[in-house]
Image (cartoon, rainbow, N blue to C red):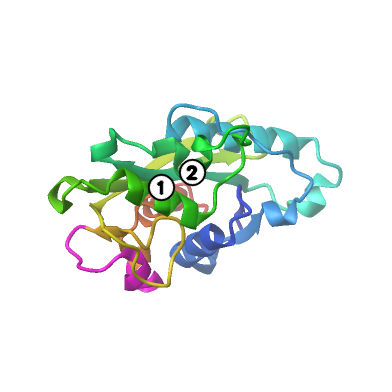
């Protein structure tokens, strides 16, 4: 069975990935490797951040004591995700800073420390308070980087998969589900936010779901799914 080590401690993100990909893989996350060093997401694009996380974690794992026991099998991959919200009226912000959007305003804030979802949402609404609905266009973008932990002579450096979900930013949060900017994001063609639509609908429409479908197709082509 192919093992996917999901490079996050975000339980919501891990659950979304598991639901979309199904039970054909063995799943681990950084909760299984608490001693893993943090990777600073300082790159200018989602693709570069995801690639950096996947490669640095794979390199660290190769020197881990009892590596073969803690990450069994020859088909083990690191799956790193970088994703965020791009708002047209804000020239693409918060973009790669989506998880740390509110902290950017705080003097002395740790640039690697994520902000609470509520603070990020409040800042976004404050910046868009005078922007009409038709100009509140936005999109969620996700880039996945897949890197084999034990490189072989026939393996490539890695793969990238991208997904995009277009929509609008609402004037107030709605719904109790989801996480991040889900209560504010209304996907194109739907009158509800992601937080209102629920996981079943979100996992068909979302940027992450689209990227994961591409990843699944690639692994199936390689005979690993």
Q: Which residue occupies the foreground of this view, 202 or 175?
A: 175
Q: Is residue 12 magenta?
A: no
Identify the residue at image location x=29%, y=37%.
90
Q: Is residue 126 visible?
A: yes
What residue is pinned by disc 2?
102
Where are the magenta residues, as a range?
A: 188-201
Contact between marks 2 and 1 (CB within 8 A): the answer is yes
* Quarter placement of the N terminus: bottom right
Which mark is on residue 123? 1
Q: Which mark is residue 201?
A: none
Q: Residue furthest left?
A: 134
User: Does residue 124 appear to the left or right of 111 in the view shown?
Assistant: left
Q: Nearer the viewer, residue 30 or 101?
A: 101
Q: Residue at x 52, y 63 (%)?
A: 18
State whether residue 151 is above or below residue 68: above
| Residue 127 coordinates in the image, percent (x, y) | 32, 43
* Residue positioned 51% across, 33% down in the render: 49
């Amino acid at each position: 069975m192919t093992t996917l080590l999901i490079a996050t401690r975000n339980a919501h993100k891990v659950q979304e990935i598991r639901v979309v990909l199904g039970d054909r893989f063995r799943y681990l996350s950084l909760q299984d490797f608490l001693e893993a060093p943090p990777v600073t997401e300082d790159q200018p694009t989602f693709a570069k951040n995801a690639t950096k996380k996947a490669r640095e974690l794979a390199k660290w794992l190769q020197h881990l004591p009892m590596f073969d026991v803690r990450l069994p099998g020859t088909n083990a991959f690191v799956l790193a995700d970088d994703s965020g919200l791009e708002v047209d009226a804000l020239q693409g912000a918060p973009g790669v800073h989506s998880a740390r959007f509110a902290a950017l305003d705080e003097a002395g804030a740790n640039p690697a420390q994520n902000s609470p979802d509520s603070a990020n949402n409040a800042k976004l609404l404050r910046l868009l308070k005078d922007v009409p609905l038709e100009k509140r266009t936005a999109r969620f973008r996700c880039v996945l980087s897949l890197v084999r932990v034990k490189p072989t002579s026939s393996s490539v450096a890695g793969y990238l998969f991208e997904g995009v979900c277009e929509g609008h930013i609402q004037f107030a949060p709605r719904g109790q589900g989801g996480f991040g900017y889900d209560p504010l994001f209304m996907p194109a063609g739907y009158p509800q936010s992601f937080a209102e639509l629920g996981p079943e609908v979100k996992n068909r429409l979302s940027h992450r779901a689209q990227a994961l479908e591409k990843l699944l197709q690639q692994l199936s082509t390689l005979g690993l799914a």
